[in-house]
Structures are given as C-alpha cells and as structure tokens.
Image (cartoon, grey):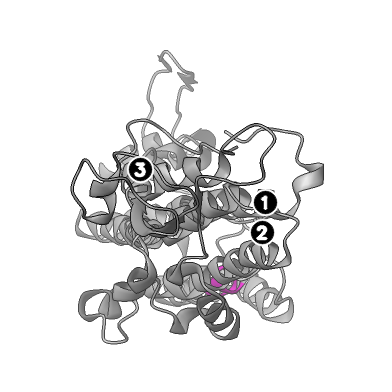
Amino acid sequence: MTSTGNYYDIDDILTDGIKLPCTFEITVPGLGFLAGHNANDAIKEGTEAELPLWLASTLSVSQITADSDKTFVSLPIPTALSQVVMNALEGDPMSVNLRDQSTHFYRFVERWLSISDLSDEMTLRMAQVTSAALQQRATSIFNHAQNPNTAVWDESGIISNLDELELGLYKIAQTATINVRKWVSSKKTT
Amino acid sequence: MEHSAATVSYLAEEQLVSIVPRQSMDSITLIGRSMPALRPLVRQEVPLWLALLLKRHGKCSIVAPAWLDIENLKHIYEQEQANRNRFSELPEHWIETSELLLNEAADDISSEPHTIRALLQDLKEIRQSKAREGMGQLTSSYIQLDNLGRMEIHELRGFMTGIMRQLHKLDSFIEQPTSDYEDD
C-alpha cells in the first residue's frame, strides 16, 4: 500500500518530488548541505530542512534503532493538507484552488495517508474530506467539460483551480463530448 | 481512447432492421452472417448497414422501428420527467440508430421527421442532465447506469471511471480494517 507507484508514471515522479519541511530529530554528520551549510558539516538535531516526499516519507517512518520511538525526521502536516484547507474543502469544495495547494493534490493526499497513522482522527478526516470533495467537484467539472462555451474562455476560472488528475479527466470528458458532436455533424453532411 | 463515437455507431449498424425491398437480390454469404435473398415487397430483416446502403441506391424502404414513433417518444419523455431518479427504457443504440435513420431515411421513418428530431433532442437533454446529477452520487464502487445507451455511456465512461478510481484509492484508507484485498 505504501508505494502506489508506477516507475514510469510522470505524475508519480512529480508527486515524489514535492518538497516538505521536516525537522531533524538527531544530528547527522555530513548532511549539512541539506540545510544549506557546508557539505562537511553535520546537520544538527532540530534543524529544519526541506526534503522531497520520497526521502522525507522514508525518514519519517523509520526508527533510529529498533527499540526507539524516535524517527530520523519529524514531519508536520504540510500547508497544502492543513486543517485550513480541509475546512475550506468541506465547506465549499469548488471554492478551493487545488492547483495552488499542489499540482498533484490527490496523489499527495494519498501518499501522506500511506505514511500516517490512520487511527488518528485528523488523518481519517483528511481522507474523508478529500474523497467527498472529489465526488462533489466531479459534478462541476463534468458540467463544465460538456459546455462548449465555458470550455474556451474559462470565465469562472474553474480550469485553473483543478489539480492534474482533475484536469486530465476534464480533458477526457471534453474530448468524448466533442467526439460525439463531431460524429453527429459528420453524419449530417453525408 | 478505446472507443470513439464512430466505433459506437459502427456497432449499431450491426443490428437488424426490417426493410421492404424494391428489387430482388441474391443471398450473399459473408464471414459474419449471410444476407438473405431479397424479393420485391417481401419484408426482410437485414443489418442496418445493408439497409442504409440499399436505401441510398433507392432499392428499398426501411420500416421504422416501433420505438421510433412520435407517440412512443412522447410517452418516454413523460416517463423521464416523472421519474427523476431513473432512466426510462430505450434500446441500447437509440441515439446512433435514430441519427442514422433520420439522416438517410427520414421519409420512411415519419411524415414529421422534425417533430421526431425535436423529441429525441429533448430526451437526450433530460437524460444528460440526469446523468450529471447522478455524478454527485458517484462512489468508489457503484454507479447506476441502467437503460443508458452506448453513446451516452461513451460520453461518461472515461471521466466516471477516472473519478471512481481515485475515490477508491482514497476510500481504502477510510475503510482500513475491511480492505483485505489489494487494489490494481
């Protein structure tokens, strides 16, 4: 479950590259460059550094020693997945600009959930809110995709607030609609 | 994309329709099925593509399918309005068939092809708006699509399955204890 990934999936790779602010729980020699110091320096306990998701997720779940609760880094909930965003998504799903939060919002949520403690109420809520939000956003996105006029101008700004998954599906829905229309008109001329 | 509208329409042309031939034609054996011998004014069932081909050459007239009738379509439209939660029964290929027949054999179908066209358009629209409403009830595992035609499903499929796939992934975190199966 932890790896959702397909090695060649570009969206997966991009999700892996999302930078997360982490705090080192122990001092590690020779990693100073992560915090912008000299390469030979140690990175000190308590130092904050931005690590990509693939690295941060491993370090945040692996214990320093087998019998220790301590992990290499602690990983606070990132801004994109914060309570503020979840509250807004719960209130009016369409009002949130997901793209501003993350270009791969849903995958990000998924990856976050896969390294989180699911008995935690906040984590569970994140899964529920995100799932409900996608379900509701689907209706608006589909309506928008089927309407040929809004599709060109995006006056409502809907398209610029979709994450990559939604944008991809928007294109699929739009292509299918156009495809049917073209078929109808091709039959008319013959 | 696996299926285009043209493919869906191609599949529709395989279904049988009744024609009244104006000329004789010997039976033809094809790989899929054999075409029956035709005698003038003797009704025969042939695939829609052959019917349209003969019609184009003025060699037959096509008998309108029973459902493609003004009274029946009005009735179906009323049903659509009365039951907001379900789609009324129409043949699987209703959009493709009606489109093809009205374009190429309108004179055989009805004395008022425009009325039929308008009714079909109304039906399409009311059903589309229902499908959109239904989108709000999508879950990760279930969607009700009874009585939707191929062409209607064609418009929905890619989008719906994409949303459902993602919902499934997210929901698997919510229902942890019961998920003893792997996705993908």
The crowd level at tag 2 (other Cα within 10 Å; few <14, some 14-19, many 20+) is: some
Position in image of residue A72 (x %, y %): 50, 45
Q: Quadrant of residue B35?
A: top left
Question: Which range of residues does the magenta coloring cover?
Answer: B128-133
Identify the chain of the residue marked 1, using the numbered disc in the image: B
In front of the other: label 2 or label 1?
1
Which sits in the foreground, A111 or A21? A21
CA distance separating discs 2 and 1: 14 Å
Identify the chain of the residue marked 2, using the numbered disc in the image: B
Depicted B138 relative to depicted B19: above or below:
below
Residue type highlighted by circle 3: Leu
Q: Quadrant of residue B139?
A: bottom right
Position in image of residue B157 (x %, y %): 49, 51
Residue linked to disc 2: B139
- Secondary-structure class at tag 3: helix
Which sits in the foreground, B49 or A138? A138
Which sits in the foreground, A130 or B1? A130
Residue at position x 35%, y 78% in the image: A158
Q: Is residue B111 magenta?
A: no
In front of the other: label 2 or label 3?
2
**Would you say B125 lies left or right of A20 here?**
right
CA distance separating discs 3 and 1: 54 Å
Residue linked to disc 1: B173
Residue linked to disc 3: B52
Main SS of residues in magenta: helix
Residue type highlighted by circle 2: Thr
